[in-house]
Amino acid sequence: MNGLNLMIHIKEFLYHCEFAEGKSLNTIKSLKIDLFRFNEYILKTKNLEKISEIDTFNFREFLVELQKENIGKRSLNRKISSMRSFFKYLKETQKIKRDPTQLIVAPSYDKGVPDVLSTEDINGLRESIEIKNYHNLRDRLIVELLYSSGITSQELLGLGEEVFNIDEREVIVSSFKKSRVVYFSERTREYFKRYIEAKKDKLKEKYKSDILFVNGSGTRLTDRSLRRLIDRYAIRAGIEKEISPHSFRHTFAVHMLEHGMKVNQLQKLLGHSSLDSTKVYIEALDKKRKKEIFIN
């Protein structure tokens, strides 16, 4: 197998992930890094003529090579996941008959403690949004609202203007037929006012108050679009780890605990039915403190 042949399949797969499956830009970036690394390994160490000749033994050797570089279990799991997705695609498109990754067991690691964004990450995202038009105002409002309220992306995209109490800095969010009141920052209030004014001026007769976050045609912003804009600003801000709209919810929760909020109060703000779901952020807070102590 020549390297160009494998690279063609990799590029076809990345194209499929981005345009057919709508995966995020950061996900595409991670897949590209992992698959290019695999291609590099195959070129240097193997003398294969067809992609179907890649077997489980080759894959295990690649993992051993990665482990020699002392990468963490989380990173190794990500690379295994990338390989599995790639070879699953090759099998589904009938490029290969057997998937060499099926017998690979990924190392276990603690998935229960979410990663959170640092204050530097948040400020970097803010600075990456240059306010030139109403779309930029919309994006900045999204970042501020997600970070200061802890709401989910589904709740955010379902918002209308009428559920906001600007004076009290409150908003009513609904999820699974349940409603709750959450709060937002002074900074969010200011961007809300600026965005609404710019939105009315831009959309004119297409303006609708029952949809807060809209796209260029005045219809509701989609989850896919939300994820892509978060990816775009994360890349601009130089944030290398993969983030999503949900990262802001994790960050909000940990930051609230850092500032002394009781876990049962946080549970109400997050809308968790079980306190156990909220307690995971105590572990995340401890993890963050340990990391800061180690760094300092």
Image (cartoon, rainbow, N blue to C red):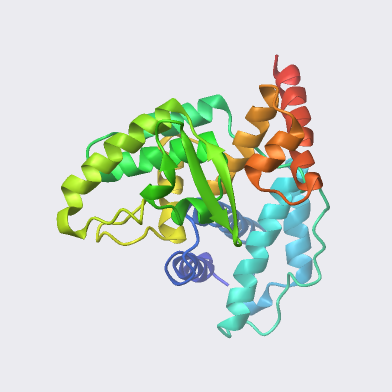
Q: Is residue 165 left or right of residue 296?
A: left
Identify the residue at image location x=26%, y=59%. 218
Is residue 293 or residue 123 the one in the foreground?
123
In the depicted structure, whether residue 208 falls above or below residue 95: above
In the depicted structure, whether residue 265 falls above or below residue 106: above
Is residue 57 or residue 89 the one in the foreground?
89
The quarter of the picture where the N terminus appears is bottom right
Identify the residue at image location x=36%, y=51%. 212
In the depicted structure, whether residue 26 falls above or below residue 286: below
The quarter of the picture where the C terminus appears is top right
User: x%, y% of residue 279?
Assistant: 79, 40
Identify the residue at image location x=67%, y=58%. 45
Identify the residue at image location x=35%, y=37%. 192
The part of the image, by quadrant, that contains residue 290 is top right
In the depicted structure, whether residue 122 falls above or below residue 91: above
The part of the image, by quadrant, that contains residue 115 is top right
Residue 9 appears in the picture as rendered: yes
User: x%, y% of residue 111?
Assistant: 76, 48
User: x%, y% of residue 200?
Assistant: 21, 47
Residue 27 appears in the picture as rendered: no
**Residue farthest top in this picture:** 296
Is residue 262 or residue 153 the one in the foreground?
262
User: x%, y% of residue 9?
Assistant: 51, 71
Count of numbered tags: 0
Is residue 192 or residue 31 the one in the foreground?
192
